Amino acid sequence: MVGIVIGIMTRRWGSSHARLALVLWAQALGVLAAALLLGFSGLLIGALLVGGGFLSVVQLSLLYARELAPQHLRYMAGLLTTGYAVGPLLSFLSTALLHRLEPALWVAGASLVWAGLLVWRRAADAG
């Protein structure tokens, strides 16, 4: 809920693309913190950054989708849902095959960084 409030308060700052990229990168930091920092501190930082930004990512992604392809909003929402649904599957495979969660966290963190770069590039191209 805090992420949504911050998103509403900052809606006049920058484009939806740039704000989405920043929230994706904050989530990437949270995922990577969970992989790098041992114990409760990594888990806490990860939960705050990933969980705090999740609804904001959904809100900004749907806003961005409406800007890019208003006639395909349901399709774009499906892509967003599918993207986040890959995480639990990857976590399962990582723990089942490697007996460790860290490889899944590294892939998730890299994916969020990459997604932010793609969105940021679109923001730079549009601006």
Image (tube, helix red, strand yellow):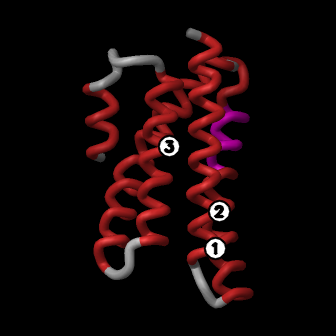
Question: Callout 1: few (<14), some (14-19), or many (20+) C-alpha neighbours within 10 Å?
Answer: some
Q: CA distance from mark 2 to mark 3?
A: 14 Å
Q: Which residues are magenta?
A: 74-81
Q: In which quadrant of the rendered image does the C terminus lie?
A: top right
Q: Is residue 100 left or right of residue 71?
A: left
Query: Mark 3 — residue?
Result: 24
Residue lying at 48% horizontally and 44% vertically, measured from the top left:
25
Of residues 3 and 110, the one drawn nearer to the viewer in this rendering: 110
Residue lying at 48% horizontally and 23% vertically, measured from the top left:
16
Question: Callout 3: few (<14), some (14-19), or many (20+) C-alpha neighbours within 10 Å?
Answer: many
Q: CA distance from mark 1 to mark 3?
A: 19 Å
Q: Are marks 2 and 3 in contact (CB under 8 Å)?
A: no
Q: Quadrant of residue 108?
A: bottom right
Element carrying mark 2: helix
Q: Earlier in the sequence, mark 2 or mark 3?
A: 3
Query: Mark 1 — residue?
Result: 103
User: As shown in the figure, which amino acid type bears the numbered disc 3?
Assistant: Leu
Element carrying mark 3: helix
User: As shown in the figure, which amino acid type bears the numbered disc 2?
Assistant: Val
* Furthest-top residue in this view: 127
